[in-house]
Image (tube, rainbow, N blue to C red):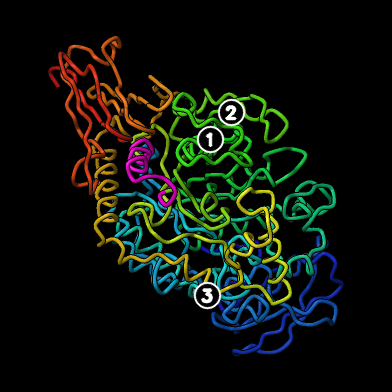
């Protein structure tokens, strides 16, 4: 159970404290309470690792480290910071928790449906316990896994999670370590896997004492959007890499996580590109008998990341494939600024993406000024994680507005049907299932001076956008430091009883149930999907196995006829059953179902407005 590398963990009779501080000549452990309270000099090895077991110390004891007679500092590998990131660390005993998930294993890849959530805004309480209480509602939706946005402790009382500074400590704003364990244990009891978003490419700007202990943690050889890159290939990088892999292992071993989502892996820069990512994957899987999922967020469209290790790939289980989102957002909402400029938003682009996994496979990107992407044909489709929205694609917008707030309800339903019948792995952002009316805005709680700079920077970030080209318009952008910005982002679960939200929820439940019921509609093991665009506004996706064939016909913009009379493999002689339309009264308050002309099969679907039809055909004799 115990994952030794760094930190303070109980052992028989005491606690072992271990920290890497290569620049320190001397380091003292200061125990503030408990039977072993007092100062304890730490022995140092040749690599600058200070390691000591203190008899009679125990779980709950608070401690700090003093470097070369300086001020006491919290442990960079602390398992808990009960009073905040600047204060004393507390010993936690992971072995004391009574787990009830023996024999648990995550669902197979083809059944994975991810539900991304932010602990602080997911429930009224904004805590691990609050999220745990709502898990039955998530289970009843039908998704098979939750993906927690980062929980590593951060300064202040609220944060997106991407300003974390303690890579081993759950945020005390959400609860104690055992509260997180209870969340995972309950998720497993309900049949939900749990993935955790982890950030190893940078540390937040406040409370990051790690570099005080270890000046070698950052590199002057590489630069990222957050500043100096983490040192993965310079002097001392071996121990930096160990610190990161130890953190990743501890989330899996001490919290029973089923997998990790690695944030912005394109910013883990090193001479041997991808070695750190491969090391993380190998480290977390090394001692586990159950499958551990490793997903990455990476904008490079590198197929090697999700190709099998035996074939020379990196062996990851999934990568966020954002082209799917960008095409739909451009086509439905008209976004054309920034990276959206690389997309036209047509159904033909979407069809190519459903066939390939992503659109850019080496073409020139006008936005980047260089080529982007590689050929993904060696990777199974289930390794592409796609979405209509996620925390980035909502929260990185100036107002934090969701896609369902920007497009008509009929188009939203059609796009949702495409997402939940695609051959890739779908991800849903919390509240998406009921077309939540709450935004998800960018929020922080930094010290006043830093907070002022964050607010100014946030508003300057959008100065080049036409809607915010003047100072008056930019003042409308919510202040990240304001508690009101955080509160506005909290889900309102009572919305689900309102007719429009209830209809959206019914659609999501039905689509997810269909996906899980029919093998042919799950995420695919094949190396490509089947899709085509009969016109600029209509997508047709074919999903099939040995027994069943499904056609998903999605009209994404406007009304119009979709004529299959010359498409023999679609029309066929076998009868097609209408499984679902997104314009049924259960899903639409003002239903406008398409007319379907049927002869020996389907000939024409006449859409009055955007919508989707799912057709099914079973092989004779089955």
Q: Is residue 167 visible?
A: yes
Q: Position of 192 compared to 343: left or right?
A: left
N-term-proximal mark, 3 vs 1: 3
Residue 150 in the magenta stretch? The answer is no
In the picture, the quarter occupied by the C terminus is top left
Is tag 1's residue or tag 2's residue first in the polypeptide sequence?
1
Pointer 3 with pointer 1, Cβ within 8 A: no
Q: State the CA–CA distance, disc 3 to disc 1.
A: 35 Å
Q: Number of numbered discs present?
A: 3
Rounded to the nearest angstrom, the CA distance separating label 1 from label 2 is: 8 Å
| Residue depicted at x 73% and y 44% | 269
For disc 3, the marked residue is: 173
Q: In the rendered image, is residue 527 in sight? A: no
- Badge 2 density bin: few <14, some 14–19, many ≥20, Cα 10 Å: many
In percent of width and height, residue 217 lies at 77, 58
The first of marks 3 and 2 along the sequence is 3
Q: Position of residue 370 (x, y in %)?
A: 72, 30
Which residue is at 47% across, 58% downward?
Answer: 148
The label on residue 323 is 1
Occupied quadrant, residue 125: bottom left
Magenta range is 404-419
Residue 367 sits above or below residue 288 on the image: above
Q: Is residue 417 magenta?
A: yes
């Amino acid at each position: 159970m115990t994952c030794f590398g760094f930190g303070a963990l109980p052992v028989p009779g005491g606690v072992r404290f271990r920290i890497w501080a290569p620049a320190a000549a001397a380091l003292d452990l200061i125990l503030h309470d408990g039977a072993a309270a007092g100062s304890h000099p730490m022995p140092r090895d040749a690599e600058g690792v200070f390691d000591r077991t203190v008899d009679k110390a125990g779980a709950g004891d608070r401690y700090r480290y003093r470097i070369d007679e300086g001020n006491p500092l919290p442990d960079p590998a602390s398992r808990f910071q009960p009073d905040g990131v600047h204060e004393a660390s507390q010993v936690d005993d992971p072995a004391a928790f009574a787990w009830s998930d023996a024999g648990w294993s995550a669902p197979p890849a083809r059944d994975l449906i991810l539900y991304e959530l932010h602990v602080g805004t997911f429930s009224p309480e904004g805590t691990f316990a609050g999220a745990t209480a709502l898990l039955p509602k998530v289970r009843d939706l039908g998704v098979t896994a939750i993906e927690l946005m980062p929980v590593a402790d951060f300064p202040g009382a609220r944060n997106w999670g991407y300003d974390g500074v303690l890579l081993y400590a759950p945020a005390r704003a959400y609860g104690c370590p055992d509260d997180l364990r209870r969340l995972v244990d309950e998720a497993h009891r309900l049949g939900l896997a749990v993935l955790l978003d982890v950030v190893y490419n940078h540390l937040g700007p406040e409370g990051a004492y790690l570099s005080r202990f270890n000046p070698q943690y950052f590199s002057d050889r590489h630069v990222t959007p957050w500043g100096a890159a983490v040192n993965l290939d310079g002097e001392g990088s071996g121990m930096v890499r160990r610190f990161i892999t130890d953190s990743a292992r501890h989330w899996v071993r001490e919290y029973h996580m089923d997998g990790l989502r690695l944030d912005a892996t394109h910013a883990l820069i090193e001479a041997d590109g991808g070695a750190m990512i491969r090391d993380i994957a190998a480290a977390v899987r090394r001692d586990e008998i159950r499958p551990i999922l490793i997903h990455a967020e990476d904008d490079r469209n590198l197929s090697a990341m999700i190709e099998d290790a035996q074939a020379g790939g990196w062996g990851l289980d999934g990568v966020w494939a954002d082209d799917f989102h960008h095409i739909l957002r451009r086509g439905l909402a008209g976004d054309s600024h920034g990276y959206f400029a690389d997309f036209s938003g047509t159904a033909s682009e979407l069809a190519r993406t459903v066939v390939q996994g992503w659109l850019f496979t080496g073409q020139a990107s006008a936005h980047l000024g260089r080529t982007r992407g590689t050929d993904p044909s060696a990777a199974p489709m289930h390794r592409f994680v796609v979405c209509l929205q996620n925390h980035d694609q909502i929260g990185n917008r100036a107002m934090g507005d969701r896609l369902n707030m920007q497009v008509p309800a009929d188009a939203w339903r059609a796009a949702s049907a495409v997402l939940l019948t695609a051959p890739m792995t779908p991800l849903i952002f919390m509240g998406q299932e009921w077309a939540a009316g709450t935004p998800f805005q960018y929020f922080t709680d930094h010290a006043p001076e830093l907070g002022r700079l964050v607010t100014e920077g946030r508003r300057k970030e959008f100065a080049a956008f036409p809607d915010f080209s003047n100072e008056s318009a930019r003042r409308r952008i919510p202040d990240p430091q304001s508690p009101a910005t955080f509160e506005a982002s909290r889900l309102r679960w009572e919305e689900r009883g309102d007719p429009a939200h209830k209809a959206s929820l019914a659609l999501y439940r039905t689509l997810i149930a269909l996906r899980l019921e029919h093998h042919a509609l799950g995420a695919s093991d094949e190396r490509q999907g089947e899709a085509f665009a009969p016109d600029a506004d209509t997508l047709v996706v074919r999903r099939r196995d040995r027994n069943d064939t499904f056609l998903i016909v999605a009209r994404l913009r406007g009304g119009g006829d979709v004529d299959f009379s010359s498409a023999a493999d679609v029309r066929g002689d076998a009868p097609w059953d209408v499984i679902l339309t997104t314009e049924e009264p259960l899903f639409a308050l003002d239903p406008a179902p398409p007319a379907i002309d049927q002869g020996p099969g389907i000939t024409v679907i006449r859409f009055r407005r955007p919508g989707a039809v799912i057709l099914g055909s079973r092989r004779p004799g089955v």
